[in-house]
Image: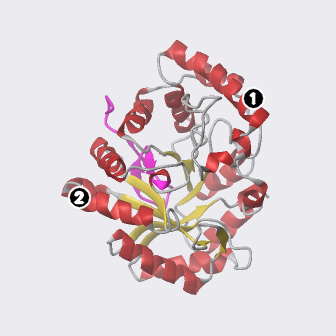
């Protein structure tokens, strides 16, 4: 799928070597319309075959569906590929029977309970990287990561991760136990980590697994102004996909497209390559749901951006140029990283 082997990057100074691109599996189970189980499993297999080792999921993606899907994909993959796979699991987001978000639970007993269920669904005896999806405002982060540290001592987890937390919380967590990486949204149009969060992770030797590198397809080059979304698609309520915001954001994509065309690569490849170029401590997570989209994303590994090209990209899509927040207001309120 790619003309060069997938290189590896260290995931923080305390973490493992992982592929320079990770596969975010959420969309295979939820939030972006209909899914195709057979194609999803084929995509995971293709990713492993290409050399991707990091598979990212959450126990609340499809309320367990995604972990079961990864279990099946790994179980049916060649042994050598299965053994190289690393699982990154988020926990803590609670859902009602109708799928509504009803809170975050980071209590130590809940952490261990969530992990027990994930181990069962994944069909494994350990989770490689374990992280709470959002900070529980009622539980000190020290208690939550301390519980993960106890799971590490028991052999059920290998590394502690964080997700969508701010600089102060990162410092508090790292004072308790080594932290491998912070998972957080980072893309050409979501650059909020650059001012305070990224300097702290670099000071502490914590890696970044960057999700939303294509902003949920918005800057992929494939999203059109007249696209009709399926019921339940997250983008139907995302501020960046609404009305004038969408028009302004796609104007940015048109500017990016001109640069991509001059280089002879796709818009998506340009956007992913830009994230990869921001540092060896950053691993983009690509949310490919099909083998075609995976192949395109892997092609970003062939794209080298020189200083002039990076400057042109950032001039076309300046920091802070995106119209609309990355989540609806009620979800933004749960982001410690945005405070």
Give the residue drawn at x 63%, y 77%: 105
Q: Work out whether residue 31 can be spotted.
A: yes
| Residues drawn in magenta | 1-26
Q: Could you tell whether 75 is left or right of 261 in the image?
A: left
Q: Considering the numbered disc 2 on the image, is that residue within a helix, a strand or a loop?
A: loop
Question: Can residue 305 be found in the magenta stretch?
Answer: no
The Cα atoms of the two marked residues, 2 and 1, are separated by 44 Å
Where is residue 229 shown, x and y percent of the image? Answer: 59, 42
Q: Which residue is mark 2?
A: 76
Q: Considering the numbered disc 1 on the image, is that residue within a helix, a strand or a loop?
A: helix
Q: Could you tell whether 217 is left or right of 28 in the image?
A: right
Figure quadrant of the N terminus: top left
Where is residue 227 shown, x and y percent of the image? Answer: 60, 33
Mark 2 neighbour class, 10 Å CA radius: few under 14, some 14 to 19, many 20 or more: few
Q: Which residue is mark 1?
A: 248
Q: Work out whether residue 314 can be spotted.
A: no
Residue 8 vs 70, above or below: the answer is: above
Where is residue 90 shown, x and y percent of the image? Answer: 53, 65
Residue 259 vs 30, above or below: the answer is: above
Label 2 vs 1, first from the N-terminus? 2
Residue 279 vs 273, above or below: the answer is: below
Query: Which quadrant of the view contains residue 135?
Result: bottom right
Where is residue 31 shown, x and y percent of the image? Answer: 56, 53
Along the line of sight, the residue nearer the viewer: 103 or 269: 103
Residue 323 vs 144, above or below: the answer is: above
Query: Which quadrant of the view contains residue 121?
Result: bottom left
């Amino acid at each position: 799928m790619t003309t060069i082997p997938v290189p590896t990057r260290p995931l923080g100074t305390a973490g493992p070597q992982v592929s320079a691109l990770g596969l975010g599996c959420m969309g295979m189970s939820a939030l972006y319309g209909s899914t195709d189980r057979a194609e999803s499993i084929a995509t995971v297999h293709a990713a492993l075959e290409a050399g991707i080792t990091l598979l990212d999921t959450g126990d609340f993606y499809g309320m367990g569906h995604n972990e079961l899907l990864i279990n099946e994909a790994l179980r049916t993959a060649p042994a050598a590929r299965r053994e190289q796979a690393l699982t990154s699991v988020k926990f803590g987001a609670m859902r009602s029977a109708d799928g509504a978000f009803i809170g975050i639970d980071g209590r130590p007993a809940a952490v261990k309970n969530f992990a027990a269920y994930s181990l069962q669904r994944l069909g494994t005896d350990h989770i490689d990287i374990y992280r709470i999806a959002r900070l529980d405002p009622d539980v000190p982060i020290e208690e939550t990561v301390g519980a993960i540290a106890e799971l590490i001592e028991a052999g059920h987890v290998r590394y502690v991760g964080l997700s969508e937390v701010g600089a102060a919380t990162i410092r508090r967590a790292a004072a308790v136990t080594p932290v491998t990486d912070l998972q957080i949204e980072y893309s050409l149009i979501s650059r909020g980590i650059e001012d305070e969060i990224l300097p702290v992770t670099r000071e502490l030797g914590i890696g970044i697994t960057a999700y939303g590198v294509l902003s949920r397809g918005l800057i992929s080059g494939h999203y059109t102004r007249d696209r009709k979304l399926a019921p339940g698609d997250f983008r139907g309520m995302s501020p960046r996909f609404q009305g004038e915001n969408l028009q302004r954001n796609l104007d940015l994509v048109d500017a990016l497209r001109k640069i991509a065309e001059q280089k002879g690569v796709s818009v998506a490849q340009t956007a992913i390559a830009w994230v990869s170029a921001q540092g060896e401590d950053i691993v983009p997570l690509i949310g490919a749901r099909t083998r075609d989209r995976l192949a395109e994303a892997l092609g970003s590994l062939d794209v080298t951006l020189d200083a002039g090209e990076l400057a042109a990209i950032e001039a076309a899509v300046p920091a802070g140029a995106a119209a609309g927040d990355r989540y609806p207001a009620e979800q933004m309120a749960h982001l410690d990283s945005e405070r």
